[in-house]
Image: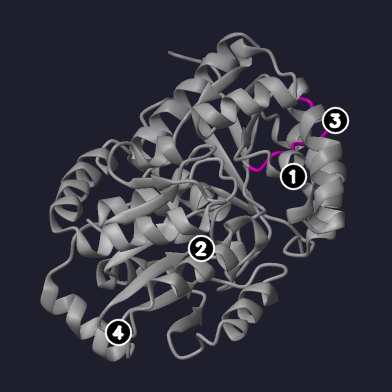
Amino acid sequence: MNTEKRRLVAFNAHLLTAADSYRSAGIAVYVMNLLRHLADVPDGLEYRVLLGDKGLAVENFDLPVIFSRVPTTRPEVRILWEQGRLPWLLRQLDADLLHAPAFVGPLLSSCPQVITVHDLSFLRHPKFFRRGNRLYLQTFTGIACRRAAAVIAVSNFTASEVRTLLRVPAERVHTIYHGVDPRFRPLPPKEVATFRRAMQLPERFVLYLGTLEPRKNLPQLVRAFARLRDPDLHLVLAGGRGWLYEQVYAEVERLGLSARVHLPGFVAAEAQALWYNAAEAFAYISHYEGFGLPVVEALACGVPTLAAARTSLPEAAGDGALLVAPDDEAAIADGLQRLLTDTALREALRQRGLAHAARFSWSETARQTAALYRQVLATS
């Protein structure tokens, strides 16, 4: 009889929330999709998913769940739980490994940790962050990552940042890309037209989809859009309100574009593919990204895409998007104009973008992550 103990991986998913807001985008997409697909990896590992929001639809992933008794949807409570309660819980579970999927794990731990770093913008561009959030990440991320058995970086660019800025040895930093859900694909024109009518969307529009926050460089996109002077073209800035989102509204008002720039708010995951498909072009000219998942999602939907030629976005875009300097307003406007008017370029980017996006899948993300778990466990 085989009496070998199954190795237990605890997964800290307390960042997940059932709320429809910017907090359920970004890192939460990574966490949810990773959990969904880890259950399908035949790795011989046992999992416990640690959660705080009891409103979550846990049937979305087929893994055992442990809910916290305290309201960790509040950031300050989540931090206290992470540093105080989580070490005790790991001992109670006799966990062999903890995956902390959002920058920081407990400084005291009875087992080795794998930590995912999504970007280091709080070090490169601290002005884009609230003071409390910035200080927390700046204080704990480096310590946690240097103590970790392994660090997952979501792009080669971010891996380089982790090695350089956090001084983590190269052999402990592993690039594992995000995936793209199969729902992001070219949709039937009739379905897209029905959606456009139901949402009362303009016939022609450039789309941005993501959190409204300073790092995304949206005032610059608004100014570049204003240069096009096409009265039939609209700009849709879709996504939840982050911090300092008022700057975007102010720029729209200043340029007199209220009739042609639309801010519909948070877009539920189920509708995102329709928004991409309905757009004539997609623009994502962020100052700094650790990966840039919306770019790959747009490419997977066959949408001609303009992206910043900076940080990780060339990795996310591959040869499937037009790249421009994010601080060059004229270049952004010119790039949009080319995407909207050059038929040959649009078709070439569409075909290359579809091929590039096909490289990314959440099942592969989960497979590589589970392989890293086993690698860490084999040496612990």
Main structural element of the magenta stretch: helix, strand or loop? loop
- Could you say where residue 261 lies in the image, as x and y percent from the top left? 46, 81
Distance from the alpha carbon under mark 1 to that under mark 2: 18 Å
Is residue 314 shown left or right of residue 196? right
Q: Which amino acid does label 3 sit on?
A: Leu
Q: Are marks 3 and 2 in contact (CB under 8 Å)?
A: no
Distance from the alpha carbon under mark 4 to that under mark 3: 58 Å
Give the residue at mark 4.
232
The magenta-colored residue range is 102-110
Q: In this view, does 2 lie above or below 223?
A: above
Eye-nearest disc, 4 or 3: 4
Distance from the alpha carbon under mark 4 to that under mark 2: 24 Å
Q: Do the residues labelled 1 and 2 touch (CB within 8 Å)?
A: no
Around disc 3, counting alpha carbons within 10 Å, would you say few (fewer than 14), some (14 to 19), or many (20 or more)?
few
Distance from the alpha carbon under mark 1 to that under mark 3: 24 Å
Give the residue at mark 2.
210
Q: Nearer the viewer, residue 262 or 75?
A: 262
Quadrant housing the N terminus: top left
Q: Nearer the viewer, residue 314 or 327?
A: 327
Give the residue at mark 1.
122
Question: Residue shown at 73%/45% (left/top)?
Answer: 125
Q: Which amino acid does label 2 sit on?
A: Gly
Q: Earlier in the sequence, mark 4 or mark 3?
A: 3
